[in-house]
Image: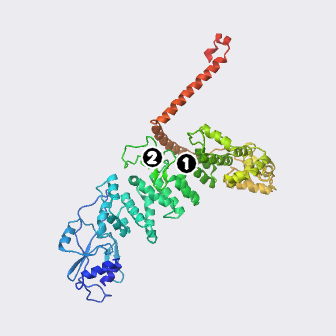
Amino acid sequence: MLRDCLGALGVPPGRLQALERIHAGGCCWTQDPLGPPPPSFELQPQHPPPTTTTRLPFASQPAPRRRRWTFTSGRRRLFLSTACGSALAPTSRSSRVADENVPQEPALARTKTLPRRGIVIPAQQPPAHARGVLAQIQDGKSQGSHYVSALGNLPREARAAVSDVPDEFLDELDLEHNSIGYFFVFDILLSERNEATDERPPLLEKLLVFLMSFDPVQIRYVIGPFLALLERIVRGELYSPLVAVDLATTALLRIDPDGSTFTPLHHILAINAFATNAVEPALKLLGADILFYPGMTNSKDTRPLCDPDVPPSAFMPSATARSGTITSAKVLEYELLCGMAYMERRDWASARTALERVITYPCKDRGASAIMVAAHKKWLLVGLMHEGKAPSLPAHTPQGAQSAYQLLNKRYSSFASLFDTFKQAELKEEFESNQDAWAEDANTELIAEVMAAYQKWQIINLRKVYLRVSISEVRSSTVDARTGQRLPDDQAALALVRDMIQSNMVQGSVEDGPTAGESYLHFPHTDTLSERDFAIEVARSHRSVEHLSSLYRATNKRLSSNKDYLRHVSQEQKRAKMDREGDAAVELEQIEDEDLMTGVMAHV
């Protein structure tokens, strides 16, 4: 029966055989194996409760404690650990005295009952050969980088001990107060179990909980290995694409709640989210405004990492082992993918903003990269969907990039210039004659949607003339650019108007009449808000101003000590001064000599 009990406790067969050899002839049952255990088998605490506690890193709460048990049978006194019997070994008096000098931990409240035996033991804990490793991971004397260094230098035997009983280690560690130790356990387990896929599901469930509730301040000390783990997740090595993208996004936003710092994972996250059609969970990160990049000039912070006010740009690495270093090409491709993600959601305003960040990217060689040229093509088409007319380049677009766009994207510029006119025949011809170009640029679907929106924007523009217009008038005054003809009947026009209202493309309502042609489209004549909506808008604006103010102060502080920026400001000031002096000289040349004698200069 002893063999059955220890087998139920999880003792390996090899250790059972060794135990039987040790106790051969000195430990046997005198009653029926299926009956209750003999009275000489008694579970007793081996040591008294401790009087000291152990302080966890970054916390003041004591660690969970364990109790050891012994039983006497025959001539031997055996030591039974609560870790599934994996630490069973004969103990002598000298060893028992040594054990008594070690502070022990009280038993946990949880218990486990063996089937058919009625034996109650405490919940499973790390075995004896792993307790020293757990003590190192729970060590509260080492702080910060010293603690990380100690865990990183664990010997191979210690790492093997963690791999033997991973669940017990994770149960003993406090996730919220020792996120570093918790992470190191996962780092060991995932590196040691690359092929043990059958043991992964329980481990991955605990990893998911960890990534959603870790302490972001502690993780700063292990940000490099932590990003390496997130990269494995993003690449789909541990979870399905949808879960992986959502989990990585949540973890990155825990480190940087504003999402204002570009990390080495932004690029690969955007690629995989777009490739696996898992864009929706990544929008929380993709929609954030990037203001800081790792390794920027004067980005270092002298405050310790445990200071919650240290910005992420001060400790974020600029590269990972697999993704490499952050480059301008990766930043541009990331912004392009952000724009395409919003295009899929038909969020044209956000898509246009993301694409503008690409086409206005600073260029040193007075030109534009291939990504910038491709983004400009999509930006023109998205602008048509957003405003119903060709957009204008922002004032801060580099001059060399503007020249490149005019030279390389003539087809798109010509097509966009015809969109807000009544030259639907020319627009249709331009669309059909450049089908190969649209397909080569992977813009066929987008430009087809633009053609379908031509008539819709004609309907929207009727609000500039009418407050209330009949559906028959809508039909007679608009044309479908795809066919070059009006809609076949008033019922089709009414269905189109209702679809536009439902999709929030036009603000208005339909007043039903006796027939479809006698129904009316009513445009709202005022933009006044209710008191409740006005209060919501004021609160939203206030939060935006506070958020932008903090980012402005941080950016201004960083740029004020940047030599390149100060040189640029100085050059701009000199250029503005020269422009003012040139304007004054022109005005003096335009003044006639006789005007000088009449005192006209007093009014200049």
Q: Which amino acid does label 1 sit on?
A: Ala
In this image, 564 relative to 371: left or right? left
Q: Could you tell me residue 168's position as x and y percent?
A: 36, 68
Q: Is mark 2 on a helix, strand or loop?
A: helix
In the rendered image of this protein, does residue 346 appear above or below residue 365? below
Work out whether residue 492 or residue 513 is closer to the camera in this orientation and state it.
492
Quarter occupied by the N terminus: bottom left
Upstream in sequence: badge 2 or badge 1: 2
Q: Could you tell me residue 288's position as x and y percent?
A: 53, 49
Q: Classify residue 493 by image quadrant.
A: bottom right
In this image, 288 relative to 595: left or right? left
Q: Is residue 19 visible?
A: yes
For mark 1, what is the residue?
329
For mark 2, what is the residue?
313
Work out whether residue 443 or residue 106 is closer to the camera in this orientation and state it.
443
In this image, 527 relative to 217: left or right? right
Q: Is residue 279 visible?
A: no
Quarter occupied by the C terminus: top right
Q: Could you tell me residue 186's position as x and y percent?
A: 40, 63
Q: Which amino acid does label 2 sit on?
A: Ser
Q: Is mark 1 on a helix, strand or loop?
A: helix
